[in-house]
Image: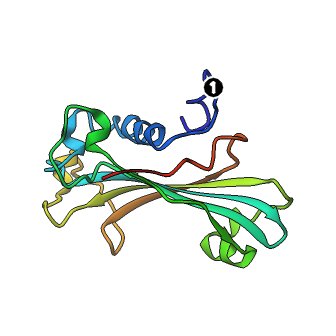
Amino acid sequence: MVQQLTNTRTNKQLTGSDLGRISYASCLNLFHNNTMFRPWPLGIYYIILYQYVKRISSDNYTYQYVWTSTGNTSEVKTELLDGMNIDSQATLTKTESQVRQLNSDLVCQKDGDERLWIQVYYATSTLTNFTKSKLELFVLEPKFGTNGNFIYNLIITPKPGLFPVPKYRNH
């Protein structure tokens, strides 16, 4: 969805609103209705973190951190994006060493190369009691990390022009 959403638009750059819609659509396989939002009847909610880098020179990278989540602290609103947390940070400058510390797969080989690290989380909340039977898991035990997250990581080379995302905040 990240790569294809803007295909029919003149301006190919993704927005915070676009990423919120991507997050919402990508978790519908588990959440078929508003169970993704507070009060989280399944005991979990959904988060996607995007970390974008573009190599400017050998030791100079543009970096942006964007996150979206269904972990909003308020009740679901009538508009989709009112129920989502979306935050695209301003771009920063990082050195190659700083990028390597984030994830060595983000280091680019030549100037102008871009990478996007997508991290998908199913997070538990201290406000709810998660039990695997809520997900109809009776044999499989989902492994959550020490901070209560079930994580999937993916690093891609995004189409040129999709990132950085203009500063956006909805939470």
Q: Quadrant of residue 17?
A: top left
Q: Is residue 7 above or below residue 165?
A: above
Kindly identify which residue carries mark 1. Answer: 7
Counting other residues with Cα less than 10 Å from the Cα at mark 1, is it few (<14), some (14-19), or many (20 or more)? few
The picture places residue 34, in percent across and down from the top left corner, at 20, 37
Q: Residue at x 59, y 29 (%)?
A: 6
Q: Left or right of 49: which side holds 145?
A: left
Q: Is residue 96 above or below residue 116?
A: below
The picture places residue 104, in percent across and down from the top left corner, at 69, 70
> Tell me, what colour scheme is on the image?
rainbow
Q: Which residue is nearer to you in this view: 42 or 11? A: 11
Q: Is residue 141 visible in this depiction of the protein?
A: no
Q: Which residue is nearer to you in this view: 126 or 143? A: 126
The picture places residue 79, in percent across and down from the top left corner, at 26, 32
Q: Residue at x 33, y 35 (%)?
A: 28
Q: Residue at x 81, y 53 (%)?
A: 112
The mark tally for this picture is 1
The picture places residue 119, in percent across and down from the top left corner, at 49, 56
Q: Left or right of 110: which side holds 132?
A: left
Q: Quadrant of residue 21?
A: top left
Furthest residue toward top: 8
Q: Is residue 103 above or below residue 44?
A: below
Q: Residue at x 85, y 58 (%)?
A: 111
Q: Which residue is nearer to you in this view: 163 or 30? A: 163
Three-letter residue code for mark 1: Asn
Q: Is residue 76 visible in this depiction of the protein?
A: yes
- Give the secondary structure at mark 1: loop
